[in-house]
Image (cartoon, grey):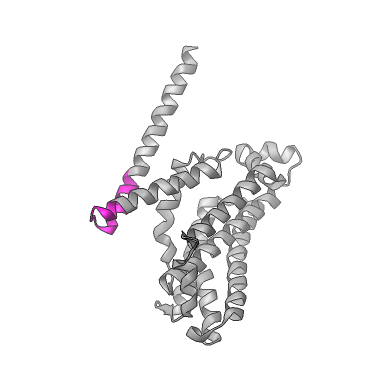
Amino acid sequence: MAGLTLAFVLNQYGGVDAGIGPFVLGTLLALGVGAACGAVMGAVIAYIGAHPILVSLAMMIFLRGLGEFLTKGGDISGFPAWMAVLGHGTVWGIPVPLILFLGCAVLWHVLLNHTRPGFSVRMIGSNIRAAAYSGLHTKRTLVLIYTLSGAMCAVAGILMLSRFNSVRVGHGEALLLVTVLACFLGGVDPFGGFGRVVPVVIALVVLQVLSSGLNLMGANQHLSTAVWGLFLVGVMILRWGAGRVSERKRKGR
């Protein structure tokens, strides 16, 4: 939806002839759309008490249907040629998407480890009821973290538009498995309370190296997705085994 927002604005101002001004305006609106979607999800989860997974699925279905309605099931293309720099350009030999990714990772690291909202996020993940009793604004923090997450999705949507030179509803759904797998590999506890940014970054690098290696071997592009799926199953089995071993050690003591 963020990519569609930017695409609509660019098309309104000339499409391939659009200048920097419309791009800045479209980017701000796209970030606003992403943040608004996240804020709605966070408010429903925090103030109504709905399950996060159900709310996420409901929002995904709603946005996909809305996007299909707005685009009539097609894609939108025809953007300024200079936007390719954002998706394929380099700065001193470093790809621009990698620079954006590292910048976002640093911001999240600082937020989670050196700010009060980051501390609240960790406490809520560990025990939301205890966090509320200790005086933390749990509902406000939940809305904030979902809002920021939506903004990050908007950044990804803008980047995908510049890389593909087109926007289509559902472009990002293929990355859902990669997201879950990277979090698992990065040591993020799906039940909350534990997780760091740096291990997730390393996990994403490992997955990208694995995908690039398969491509160099001439493997089918879809094989990477299958390997990632097996990787996810393997990680869950290893985590289960590690948990059993640590439990036995505690009992042995």
Q: Residue at x 67, y 53 (%)?
A: 47
- The answer to if 238 sits in the magenta stretch is no
Res. 206 visible in picture: yes
**Per the image, is 219 magenta?**
yes
For the image shown, how many numbered marks are present on the structure? 0
Q: Nearer the viewer, residue 211 or 38?
A: 211
Q: Is residue 66 above or below residue 253?
A: below
Q: Nearer the viewer, residue 50 or 101?
A: 101
Q: Residue drawn at (46%, 61%), measured in percent from left and top?
A: 95
Q: Position of residue 138 (x, y in %)?
A: 69, 46
In the displayed structure image, the side of residue 141 where residue 9 appears, left or right? left
Q: Nearer the viewer, residue 136 or 43?
A: 136
Residue 63 appearing in the image: no
Extreme residue in the right direction = 135
Q: Is residue 223 left or right of 144 when viewed as pictured?
A: left
User: Is 1 placed above or below 22 here?
Assistant: above
Looking at this rendering, what residue extends furthest in the top direction? 253
Q: Which residues are magenta?
A: 214-230
Q: Between 1 and 105, which is closer to the camera in this rendering?
A: 105
Which secondary structure is most common in the magenta stretch?
helix
